[in-house]
Image: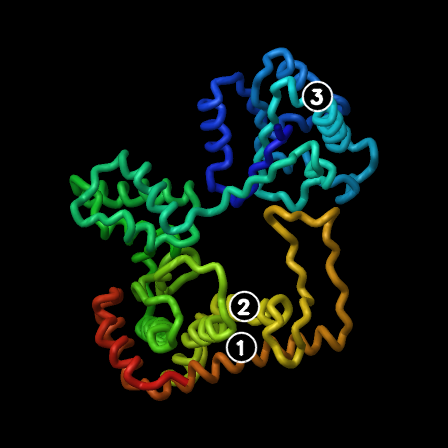
Amino acid sequence: MPKGVLLVGPPGTGKTLLARAMAGEAGVPFFSITGSEFVEMFVGVGAARVRDLFEQARAAAPCIIFIDELDALGRARGVGPLSGGHDEKEQTLNQLLAEMDGFDTSAGVVILAATNRPEILDPALLRAGRFDRQVLVDRPDRKGRADVLRVHLKKVQLGRDVDTDAVAALTPGFAGADLANLVNEAALLATRRGADAVAMADFTAAVERIVAGLERHQRVLGDKERRTVAVHEMGHALVAMTLPGTDPVHKISIIPRGIGALGYTLQRPSEDRYLASESELRNRLAVLMAGRAAEALVLGEVSTGAADDLVKATDIAHDMVARYGMSREVGQVVYDRQQQRFLNLPEGMALERGLSDDTSHRIDMAVRALVDEAFARASALLAERRALLQEGADKLLAQETLTEADLLPLAEAARRKPAV
């Protein structure tokens, strides 16, 4: 049977929880320790602790050893400022490698380990005979989120209008810990308003609070700034409602939230997606640039409100050019090789590929062309729907928040005109 099992996945997906559950189901002694507990200032202490742990495990066999946050101990050797052979971390890692090679599989000692940074682990840890099995504990899909939510919802009193599947649909990309936090936030919101049960509106507000940040009613915007924010957010929403294949707009608000958000447009994916076509990415770019395009069209000048949109748009455009080969000018060559984060890890640490000045220039020009094209496309769409843009911005100024039901007439009117 395998000697070692490595659980890899993003933070909060339940790797440690899974190890604890496994220990309970197996009904054998369970030795739990974190990688950082091996690392000490004094030379030799970490290696001695590894020896002691395995001696105890052999005496108590059959048993399970669980090492949490393995990356604290198993970082690749020869990388970093202290990469000498006498580094304490390296001595501890060498001892762990020797112990994993030394014990017999028939002794009944199984090693479990968990990490969210497998790309920095030493290749010697991942070879056959040590951590033979690498199990991906990924973020749950829609069905998985619904199942996780049902576990946490048992602890709260629910209103009749709460639909677990609808809450799961609201939370794409949420890990198990995020869903537990969501239920807790919704319960807190219901408690604050003196309710006996948690309603669907509390879950929606909790999602907004986690995604966009706290509402900041004390931050009072001037009339000119409020109008700029309203036009900006309505620009995003109108283009998102017009273009095919974009996520449906769930809510728009001009109430300041979090650290820097003066308003936000919440889009809710209708299903989990694992692939994106070139047309979908171009549509996403157009939606991101639509806020600035609306400002330029209605107000005659742009503001700093699009700073975050520009960062996201530039990142998507750069990935299209340098990673996905979606630029005819640059070609179907990968220039930005992303390090593997989960499974199928490359041997050793990946080195950045050096680019010539000419190639870097062509990549920069192609990225700029994609962003400029998205801005022009959003501007053309909004120019055709300028009356709708004004109407929506006025409505948003009056109500401060517009829901999916409020936006339905605008969405139907926007789709009547053909998209460019």
Tag 1: Cα neighbours inside 10 Å, few (<14), some, or many (≥20)?
many
> Please, what is the three-letter code of the amino acid marked with disc 1?
Val
| Marks 2,1: beta carbons within 8 A | no
Q: Which residue is mark 1?
A: 371
Quadrant in which the C terminus appears: bottom left
Quadrant in which the N terminus appears: top right
Residue at the image point whose x is 49% and y is 46% from the top: 138
Above/below status of 132 relative to 321: above
Q: List x then y, in percent, for residue 56.
A: 63, 14
> Please, what is the three-letter code of the amino acid marked with disc 2?
Ile
Looking at the image, is mark 1 or mark 3 nearer the viewer? 3
Q: List x then y, in percent, for residue 264.
A: 36, 64
Q: Which residue is mark 2?
A: 316
**Along the polypeptide, which appears first: circle 1 or circle 3?**
3
| Gap between marks 3 and 2 measured at Cα | 48 Å
Q: Quadrant of residue 91?
A: top right
| Marks 3,2: beta carbons within 8 A | no
Residue at the image point whose x is 48% and y is 80% from the top: 375
| Gap between marks 2 and 1 measured at Cα | 9 Å
Q: Which secondary structure lies at badge 1?
A: helix
